[in-house]
Image (cartoon, helix red, strand yellow):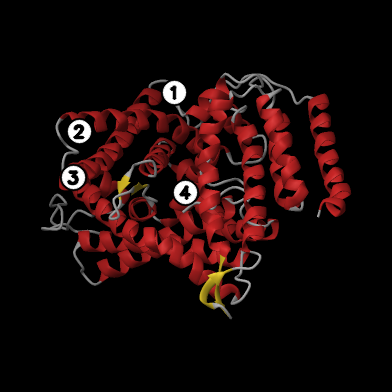
Amino acid sequence: MLPIDAAAHSSRWRRRHPADKAVLGLGLTVLAISLPPWPGAALVLVTALAVLLGPAGVPARRLWRAYRVPLGFCVTGALPLLVQVGGPDGFVSWAGNGPLRAGELLLRTSAASLGVLLFAFTTPMSDLLPRLVRAGVPAPLVDVALVTYRMSFLLLDSVRRIRQAQAARLGHTTRAAAWRSLGGLGATAFVRAFDRAARLQNGLAGRGYDGTLRVLVPEARVSVRFTAASLALLAALAVLTLVLERPLS
Amino acid sequence: MHIAEGFLPPVHAVAWGVASAPFVVHGARSLIRDVREHPESTLLLGASGAFTFVLSALKLPSVTGSCSHPTGTGLGAILFRPPVMAVLGTITLLFQALLLAHGGLTTLGANVFSMAIAGPWAGYGVYRLLRRYDVPLMAAVFCGAFVADLATYCVTSVQLALAFPDPGSGFLGALGTFGSVFAVTQIPLAVSEGLLTVLVMRMLVQSSTGELTRLGVLVASAAGRKPTDTTGAVGR
C-alpha cells in the first residue's frame, strides 16, 4: 500500500463521510488558487497545515515526505519565471518582477497542494471510489477504477520482487544489463496484470459474476455540523484575505 | 511532466478541463459499451489501468545519468488505443494526484489533455502511419513512443506558456523559456522511453502473442500462422 493511502486508512477522520472532507480539503485548494496569493494563499497554507497536524492528526514526518514531492515540482516550474526572453538587457535576462511572480506561484501551489493532501491523508481510495456511483459517475467506469486501484498494489509488489530478483542475478551491474532488466520488468508487469485479470475472471465467474463488482462500503453520514464549520472556516478565510489585502500589500 | 496542484490560474484550469472532457467522455462511452457487451472486460481494463499506473512508477535511467519516470502514453496508446487511454490515463492521473501527490486535482484537466490525450493520439498516429508504409514493427513502436513523450512535453510547455506569458516577449518567449528548461531533460527521456518501449514490446511479442493479438496489436496471418516479432510479424 502506498504511504498516503496507508495513512488515510488509519486516519482519525477515516469514519467521516468523504463529502465532509472534500468540502474542507478541496475547498481550501479552490481558495488557494482563487484568492490573491498574498495574503490569501498564505492564510490557506497556515490553516491547512494547522488542520492537518492538529484535528486530522497526520504525523508531521509523513506529511513532509508526501509534501516535498509537489514542492519539488513547484520549484522547478517556478524557475522559468525568473528570466525573460528578448528584453533590452539581452536575449535572456533576469525578469524584473520574476522573483515576485515566482514567490506568488510557490505560495499558491504549496497552499493548494496542502488542501489536496488534507483530503488524501484522511480519505482512503476504497471509501471514495464506490461512492462516486451515487455522485453520477457510471458504474462500469467506477468498477474499472476499483480494479485498477486494487490491482496496482499487487503489481507494484510484483515489480519490487522482480527488481530484487534481477539485482540478485547481477541484472543491474552494467548499463546494458540495466536496460535489459527494465524491459523485462515492464513486460513481466504486463503479463502478470493480464494473468491476474484472467484468474480473477475465473474466480468471479464461479461466484456468479454478472458484470458488477459489489464491495462493502463503511457506513458514514454527511455531518451537517462538520460541513457547516468547514464552510464557515472557508468564508472566514476569504473575508480575512479581503480585509488584509490592502494593508499588507 | 505533471503540472503541480494550484499551478494554473482558475480560468486555465477550467478551460483545460473543458477541452479534455469530449475526449474523456468519448473514451468513457466506448469503454462502457464494451463492458456492457463483455462484462469480463472490466477486469482486463482494470489490469490495463494498473499496468499504466505501474509503468509510470518505473525508474528510467536518463542519458544524463539521473533517472526519471516514463509517461507510458506511447505504449499505452499502441496497446489499448487512444480513446481507452483517455479514460485509463484520467484514472491513473487521479490516482497519482491522490496517492502520490504527483499532479493535482485543479490541474487534472490540463494533465489529462497533455498526457492522456495529446501524447497518446500523437504517438498512435505516428505508429499507425509508419505501419501503413510497412516500417518494421519495432521502429514504428520506437517512433510512436518517442513522439508521444515529446508531444506530451510540448503540450505541457504550451499550457505553461499560456498561463505565464513572458513579460517582454509574451506567449512565444515563455514557450521558448519553458521549452528550453524542459528540453534538457525531456528529449533524452523521450529517447529513453522509446528504447524502453521497444524492449518491452519485443519481450511481449515473444511471450504474450495471445494478449497482443486479442488487443489487436498483432494480427494472425491469413494462413493461420502464429504472429511473431519483426522477423515475420503481422503488426496492425
- Give the distance between the C-alpha atoms of the residues marked 3 and 1, in whole angstroms: 42 Å
- Give the distance between the C-alpha atoms of the residues marked 4 and 3, in whole angstroms: 26 Å
Q: Which residue occupies 62% across, 36% down?
A: A132
Describe the element under mark 1 as helix, strand or loop. loop
Chain letter belonging to callout 4? B
The residue identified by callout 2 is A166
Q: Amino acid at mark 2?
A: Gln
Describe the element under mark 3 as helix, strand or loop. helix
B232 shown above or below A46 = below
Q: Which residue occupies 76% across, 53% down?
A: A36
| Mark 2 or mark 1: whose residue is earlier in sequence | 2
Q: Amino acid at mark 4?
A: Gly
**Which disc, if any, is residue B89?**
4
Q: Position of residue A215 (x, y in %)?
A: 54, 23
**Could you tell me if the residues under marks 2 and 1 are in contact, i.e. CB atoms within 8 Å?**
no
- Give the distance between the C-alpha atoms of the residues marked 4 and 1, in whole angstroms: 30 Å
Label 4 neighbour load within 10 Å: few <14, some 14-19, many 20+: many
Q: Amino acid at mark 1?
A: Gly
**Which disc, if any, is residue A208?**
1
Q: Amino acid at mark 3?
A: Arg
B91 shown above or below A233 = below
The residue identified by callout 3 is A180
Q: Position of residue A81 (x, y in %)?
A: 58, 62
Chain letter belonging to callout 2? A
Q: Position of residue B130 (x, y in %)?
A: 27, 69
Q: Position of residue A50 (x, y in %)?
A: 71, 30
